[in-house]
Amino acid sequence: MFTHTAWYPDELAHAGPEHLDEAYVAGYDRKAGPESGEDLALLRELGLGERHTLVDLGAGTGSLALAAAPCCHRVVAVDVSPAMLSLLTERARRLGLQNLEVVRDGFLSYRHEGAAADFVYSRNVLHHLPDFWKAVALTRIAEIMKPGGVLLLRDLVFSFDPTETDEVIETWLTGAAKRPEEGWTRAELEEHLRAEYSTFSWLLEPMLERTGFAMRRAEHTANRIFSAYVCVKA
Protein backbone atom coordinates (compact mmCIF):
# COMPACT_ATOMS: atom_id res chain seq x y z
CA MET A 1 0.00 0.00 0.00
CA PHE A 2 1.24 3.47 -0.84
CA THR A 3 2.22 5.67 2.09
CA HIS A 4 0.64 9.11 2.08
CA THR A 5 3.45 11.66 1.97
CA ALA A 6 3.76 15.43 1.78
CA TRP A 7 4.03 15.37 -1.99
CA TYR A 8 0.61 13.79 -2.48
CA PRO A 9 -2.01 16.28 -3.71
CA ASP A 10 -4.80 17.63 -1.53
CA GLU A 11 -7.87 15.98 -3.04
CA LEU A 12 -10.18 18.36 -1.22
CA ALA A 13 -8.58 21.24 -3.12
CA HIS A 14 -9.22 19.39 -6.41
CA ALA A 15 -12.85 18.61 -5.62
CA GLY A 16 -14.24 21.90 -6.92
CA PRO A 17 -15.68 24.52 -4.55
CA GLU A 18 -19.25 23.74 -5.60
CA HIS A 19 -18.99 20.23 -4.14
CA LEU A 20 -18.19 21.75 -0.76
CA ASP A 21 -21.14 24.14 -0.79
CA GLU A 22 -24.19 22.92 1.14
CA ALA A 23 -26.67 24.79 -1.08
CA TYR A 24 -25.18 23.27 -4.23
CA VAL A 25 -25.03 19.80 -2.69
CA ALA A 26 -28.73 19.97 -1.77
CA GLY A 27 -29.61 20.03 -5.48
CA TYR A 28 -26.82 17.77 -6.68
CA ASP A 29 -28.87 14.62 -7.24
CA ARG A 30 -31.26 16.43 -9.57
CA LYS A 31 -28.32 17.59 -11.70
CA ALA A 32 -26.43 14.29 -11.58
CA GLY A 33 -29.30 12.23 -12.94
CA PRO A 34 -30.74 8.75 -12.26
CA GLU A 35 -27.80 6.55 -13.29
CA SER A 36 -27.25 5.04 -9.84
CA GLY A 37 -30.33 2.83 -10.22
CA GLU A 38 -28.99 1.48 -13.49
CA ASP A 39 -25.58 0.97 -11.93
CA LEU A 40 -26.99 -0.95 -8.97
CA ALA A 41 -28.83 -3.22 -11.39
CA LEU A 42 -25.57 -3.78 -13.24
CA LEU A 43 -23.69 -4.52 -10.03
CA ARG A 44 -26.37 -7.05 -9.07
CA GLU A 45 -26.05 -8.59 -12.53
CA LEU A 46 -22.29 -8.83 -11.96
CA GLY A 47 -22.89 -10.78 -8.75
CA LEU A 48 -23.21 -8.22 -5.93
CA GLY A 49 -24.99 -9.93 -3.06
CA GLU A 50 -25.59 -10.12 0.66
CA ARG A 51 -22.14 -11.58 1.51
CA HIS A 52 -20.18 -8.88 -0.27
CA THR A 53 -18.36 -5.68 0.64
CA LEU A 54 -18.81 -2.71 -1.69
CA VAL A 55 -16.64 0.41 -1.57
CA ASP A 56 -18.11 3.50 -3.24
CA LEU A 57 -15.24 5.90 -3.96
CA GLY A 58 -16.48 9.42 -4.47
CA ALA A 59 -19.87 8.52 -3.06
CA GLY A 60 -21.19 12.08 -3.11
CA THR A 61 -24.65 12.28 -1.57
CA GLY A 62 -24.84 8.49 -1.49
CA SER A 63 -27.32 7.68 -4.22
CA LEU A 64 -25.65 4.35 -5.08
CA ALA A 65 -24.37 3.53 -1.58
CA LEU A 66 -27.78 3.99 0.03
CA ALA A 67 -29.52 1.90 -2.62
CA ALA A 68 -26.89 -0.85 -2.44
CA ALA A 69 -26.75 -1.21 1.35
CA PRO A 70 -29.84 -3.47 1.64
CA CYS A 71 -28.24 -5.81 -0.94
CA CYS A 72 -24.79 -6.12 0.70
CA HIS A 73 -23.05 -7.26 3.82
CA ARG A 74 -21.10 -3.99 4.03
CA VAL A 75 -20.97 -0.70 2.13
CA VAL A 76 -18.22 1.89 2.65
CA ALA A 77 -19.09 5.32 1.22
CA VAL A 78 -15.96 7.43 0.72
CA ASP A 79 -15.86 11.11 -0.24
CA VAL A 80 -13.70 14.17 0.47
CA SER A 81 -16.60 16.64 0.78
CA PRO A 82 -17.97 17.26 4.29
CA ALA A 83 -21.16 18.72 2.79
CA MET A 84 -21.77 15.62 0.65
CA LEU A 85 -21.10 13.27 3.55
CA SER A 86 -23.31 15.24 5.93
CA LEU A 87 -26.27 14.75 3.63
CA LEU A 88 -25.38 11.10 3.01
CA THR A 89 -25.10 10.41 6.75
CA GLU A 90 -28.48 11.98 7.46
CA ARG A 91 -30.11 9.95 4.70
CA ALA A 92 -28.57 6.73 6.05
CA ARG A 93 -29.80 7.58 9.55
CA ARG A 94 -33.34 8.14 8.30
CA LEU A 95 -33.27 4.82 6.47
CA GLY A 96 -31.91 3.01 9.53
CA LEU A 97 -28.98 1.49 7.63
CA GLN A 98 -26.59 -0.26 9.99
CA ASN A 99 -24.17 -1.67 7.43
CA LEU A 100 -23.19 1.59 5.71
CA GLU A 101 -19.99 3.30 6.83
CA VAL A 102 -19.16 6.87 5.87
CA VAL A 103 -15.50 7.83 5.49
CA ARG A 104 -14.12 11.27 4.69
CA ASP A 105 -11.22 10.48 2.38
CA GLY A 106 -10.23 10.40 -1.27
CA PHE A 107 -8.67 8.00 -3.76
CA LEU A 108 -5.19 8.76 -2.42
CA SER A 109 -5.92 8.82 1.30
CA TYR A 110 -8.53 6.11 1.90
CA ARG A 111 -7.25 3.28 4.10
CA HIS A 112 -9.45 0.22 3.79
CA GLU A 113 -10.02 -1.80 6.96
CA GLY A 114 -11.49 -5.26 7.36
CA ALA A 115 -12.11 -7.83 4.63
CA ALA A 116 -10.96 -6.87 1.16
CA ALA A 117 -13.57 -5.35 -1.13
CA ASP A 118 -15.52 -7.62 -3.47
CA PHE A 119 -16.77 -4.63 -5.49
CA VAL A 120 -15.56 -1.07 -5.98
CA TYR A 121 -17.72 1.57 -7.64
CA SER A 122 -16.78 5.07 -8.77
CA ARG A 123 -18.83 7.45 -10.87
CA ASN A 124 -17.62 10.75 -12.35
CA VAL A 125 -14.91 11.34 -9.75
CA LEU A 126 -11.60 10.02 -11.09
CA HIS A 127 -11.40 12.99 -13.50
CA HIS A 128 -10.51 15.22 -10.55
CA LEU A 129 -7.01 13.70 -10.67
CA PRO A 130 -4.34 14.19 -13.37
CA ASP A 131 -3.30 11.03 -15.22
CA PHE A 132 -0.23 10.42 -13.04
CA TRP A 133 -2.43 10.37 -9.95
CA LYS A 134 -5.16 8.40 -11.69
CA ALA A 135 -2.63 5.59 -12.08
CA VAL A 136 -1.68 5.82 -8.41
CA ALA A 137 -5.35 5.83 -7.43
CA LEU A 138 -6.18 2.79 -9.58
CA THR A 139 -3.22 0.90 -8.11
CA ARG A 140 -4.49 1.67 -4.61
CA ILE A 141 -7.98 0.49 -5.60
CA ALA A 142 -6.60 -2.81 -6.86
CA GLU A 143 -4.74 -3.29 -3.57
CA ILE A 144 -7.92 -3.14 -1.46
CA MET A 145 -9.79 -5.68 -3.62
CA LYS A 146 -10.01 -9.44 -3.53
CA PRO A 147 -8.63 -11.33 -6.53
CA GLY A 148 -11.50 -11.51 -9.00
CA GLY A 149 -13.14 -8.46 -7.43
CA VAL A 150 -15.13 -6.19 -9.75
CA LEU A 151 -14.51 -2.50 -10.44
CA LEU A 152 -17.33 -0.54 -12.07
CA LEU A 153 -15.92 2.78 -13.22
CA ARG A 154 -17.91 5.55 -14.90
CA ASP A 155 -16.44 8.90 -15.82
CA LEU A 156 -15.98 11.66 -18.34
CA VAL A 157 -13.59 9.77 -20.60
CA PHE A 158 -13.21 11.00 -24.16
CA SER A 159 -13.39 8.31 -26.84
CA PHE A 160 -12.39 10.49 -29.79
CA ASP A 161 -9.16 11.36 -31.53
CA PRO A 162 -7.41 14.58 -30.45
CA THR A 163 -7.88 15.97 -33.95
CA GLU A 164 -11.65 15.88 -33.34
CA THR A 165 -11.53 17.80 -30.08
CA ASP A 166 -13.02 21.12 -31.19
CA GLU A 167 -15.90 19.53 -33.08
CA VAL A 168 -16.85 16.97 -30.43
CA ILE A 169 -16.51 19.28 -27.45
CA GLU A 170 -18.41 22.14 -29.08
CA THR A 171 -21.27 19.77 -29.95
CA TRP A 172 -21.38 18.62 -26.34
CA LEU A 173 -21.39 22.17 -24.99
CA THR A 174 -24.15 23.20 -27.38
CA GLY A 175 -26.44 20.63 -25.78
CA ALA A 176 -25.83 21.84 -22.22
CA ALA A 177 -28.70 22.79 -19.92
CA LYS A 178 -29.87 26.40 -20.04
CA ARG A 179 -30.28 26.75 -16.27
CA PRO A 180 -28.27 25.18 -13.40
CA GLU A 181 -31.36 23.62 -11.85
CA GLU A 182 -32.01 21.72 -15.08
CA GLY A 183 -28.56 20.14 -15.34
CA TRP A 184 -24.98 21.04 -16.17
CA THR A 185 -24.80 24.39 -17.95
CA ARG A 186 -22.33 25.37 -20.64
CA ALA A 187 -20.45 27.53 -18.14
CA GLU A 188 -20.13 24.61 -15.72
CA LEU A 189 -18.94 22.24 -18.45
CA GLU A 190 -16.44 24.81 -19.73
CA GLU A 191 -15.05 25.14 -16.20
CA HIS A 192 -14.75 21.36 -16.03
CA LEU A 193 -12.69 21.35 -19.22
CA ARG A 194 -10.41 24.15 -18.01
CA ALA A 195 -9.86 23.06 -14.43
CA GLU A 196 -10.33 19.28 -14.24
CA TYR A 197 -8.59 16.28 -15.75
CA SER A 198 -10.81 14.18 -17.96
CA THR A 199 -8.67 11.94 -20.13
CA PHE A 200 -8.89 9.95 -23.36
CA SER A 201 -10.11 6.36 -23.40
CA TRP A 202 -6.94 5.30 -25.22
CA LEU A 203 -4.93 6.55 -22.24
CA LEU A 204 -7.16 5.27 -19.44
CA GLU A 205 -7.70 1.76 -20.79
CA PRO A 206 -4.01 0.74 -20.84
CA MET A 207 -3.73 2.40 -17.43
CA LEU A 208 -6.42 0.12 -16.04
CA GLU A 209 -4.59 -2.93 -17.36
CA ARG A 210 -1.20 -1.71 -16.08
CA THR A 211 -2.58 -1.13 -12.57
CA GLY A 212 -3.89 -4.65 -12.09
CA PHE A 213 -7.23 -4.95 -13.87
CA ALA A 214 -8.52 -7.09 -16.70
CA MET A 215 -11.15 -5.22 -18.70
CA ARG A 216 -14.37 -7.14 -19.21
CA ARG A 217 -16.55 -4.42 -20.72
CA ALA A 218 -16.02 -0.93 -22.13
CA GLU A 219 -18.88 1.27 -23.25
CA HIS A 220 -18.72 4.77 -24.73
CA THR A 221 -21.68 7.10 -25.12
CA ALA A 222 -22.73 8.21 -28.57
CA ASN A 223 -21.40 11.72 -27.98
CA ARG A 224 -18.01 10.18 -27.05
CA ILE A 225 -17.82 12.13 -23.79
CA PHE A 226 -18.59 9.47 -21.16
CA SER A 227 -17.29 5.94 -20.75
CA ALA A 228 -18.06 3.03 -18.46
CA TYR A 229 -15.80 0.11 -17.61
CA VAL A 230 -16.35 -3.22 -15.92
CA CYS A 231 -12.97 -4.56 -14.79
CA VAL A 232 -11.85 -7.53 -12.74
CA LYS A 233 -8.84 -7.52 -10.45
CA ALA A 234 -6.37 -9.79 -12.20
Image (cartoon, helix red, strand yellow):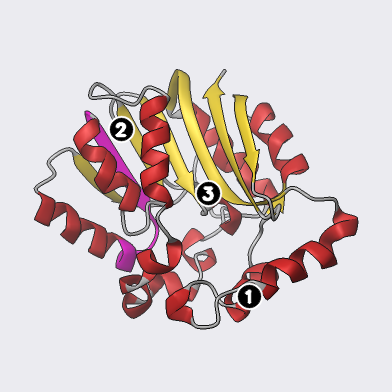
For marks 3 and 1, the one nearer the N-term is 3
Disc 3 to disc 1: CB gap under 8 Å: no
For marks 3 and 2, the one nearer the N-term is 3
The C terminus lies in quadrant: top right
Image coords of residue 53 (percent x, y): 30, 29
Q: Which mark is residue 107?
A: none
Q: Please name the residue that numbered disc 2 is placed on.
A: 113
Residue 83 falls inside the magenta stretch: yes
Q: In this rendering, would 41 be left or right of 221?
A: left
Residue 174 versus residue 66 in the image, above or below: below
- Asked whether 213 or 7 is in front, the reply is 213
How packed mark 3 is, by other alpha carbons closer than 10 Å (few <14, some 14-19, many 20 or more), is few
Q: Amino acid at mark 2?
A: Glu
Q: Amino acid at mark 1?
A: Glu
Residue 212 falls inside the magenta stretch: no
Front label number (2 vs 1): 1
How packed mark 2 is, by other alpha carbons closer than 10 Å (few <14, some 14-19, many 20 or more), is few
Front label number (3 vs 2): 2
For marks 2 and 1, the one nearer the N-term is 2
Instruction: Please identify the quarter of the rendering in which residue 136 is found.
Output: top right
Give the CA distance from mark 2 to mark 1: 36 Å
Give the CA distance from mark 3 to mark 2: 20 Å
Residue in the picture at 69% in, 28% down:
210
Image coords of residue 229 (percent x, y): 58, 36
Residue range corresponding to the magenta coloring: 73-84
Q: Please name the residue that numbered disc 1 is placed on.
A: 191
- Asked whether 182 or 186 is in front, the reply is 182
